[in-house]
Image (cartoon, rainbow, N blue to C red):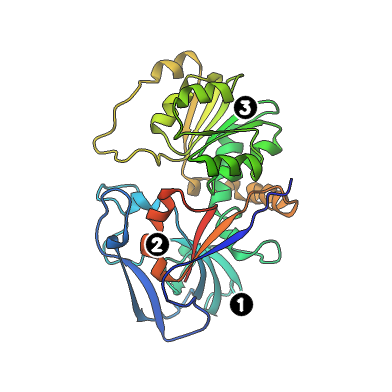
Amino acid sequence: MNIAGTTHTAQAGQHSPNTGLTGLNREVRVVQRATGIPGPEVFRVGEAPRPECAADGVLVRVLYASVDPGMRGWLSAERNYFHVADGEVMPAEGVGVVIESRDPRWQVGDQLFGRFGWQQYAAAGAAQLHWRIDPKIAPPPVWVGSLGFNGLTAWVGLRHLGRPRAGDTVLITTAAGAVGSVVASLARASGANVVGIAGGPAKVRRCLDDLGYAAAIDYKAPDLARSVVQACPNGVDVYFDNTGGAIADAVFAVLNKGARIVQCGTTSVASWNPPPSGPRRERDVLVKRLSWCGFVITDHADLFPRAFEELKDLYVRGALAADTQILDGLDAAPGALQYLYSGANHGRLCIRP
């Protein structure tokens, strides 16, 4: 099965994609805090002078910028581990091409993955530059997704924390998403039985037809708990959770003794202030000997070389989910997070400035 994916382009706004060097920089800045999912009122699209290359850095023309679920927390009125201040250019990982360099490690024409933000040009130093990409292996949007932090997150979460064995049942939430779909590719490569939970019949069908899941569940359908039991008759050995909340409540009942829970996200929880109440699972953790681990991908850079080795191999063999959807122009950026959280996107969502 070849699941390497396709690229979809969605038009939004009238601004043309960035195609050449100008003296101005079109950019998206944060202008207020968000309550709930950030909408257009949180951002302002404008122009400023193109930044100058720092003495020890590079000037990058941004080719693609990411739209990530975690940005919701960055923009929240609640304080989080990473917080974006009003007036800042919206941070985002992405791929760019070097147009000026004062750092001997990087040459003009190099394509790099780094934190460049929602803007056309970025002046970046060592802290913002992650690694060089190889467009001969995969096109730049894939390096924002399945061969970027999405793929690394899937690999670290599953391989390092989930540790599936052949014959295990691996259950994945947001199964058709940018991380979940890569987790499925990796779990299948381990010989696991892979089950997904997604939202709506179209995404369930995509899990089954395009992403290689053995079974898929619509969490919006009635009686989720019963559906989970039916899809996982032998229980669950690895639960890769991107949602938390009521979906996780339904899954705990089928976790096997010694199961590993990988907490990658909590997208179904509207607010953590105050923390929501719900079923208490401490007894399950105790008597089933469960392992419940959270992680932040940037804490595991030492594992990236091993992760890249497998991810690139799977991509070249056509066995790595790598769908991308591209929004054209920064005018699309202010509504991008609402679009992402609506579930209407297909695979990794990017903006082409």
Q: Secondary structure at mark 1?
A: loop
Q: Secondary structure at mark 2?
A: loop
Distance CA(mark 3)–CA(mark 1): 45 Å
Where is residue 6? Give x, y as percent: 63, 58
Task: Indicate which disc residue 169 carries.
Answer: 3
Where is residue 346? Give x, y as percent: 54, 53
Residue flagged by tag 3: what amino acid is it? Thr
- Mark 2, other Cα within 10 Å: few <14 / some 14–19 / many ≥20: many
Q: Which residue is mark 2?
A: 91
- Does 256 sit left or right of 273 as displayed? right
The numbered mark, 2 or 3, whose residue comes first in the sequence reads 2
The answer to whether 117 is drawn above or below residue 323 in the figure is below
Where is residue 244? Give x, y as percent: 41, 34
**Residue at image x 65%, y 45%?**
210
The numbered mark, 3 or 1, whose residue comes first in the sequence reads 1
**Residue at image x 53%, y 80%?**
19
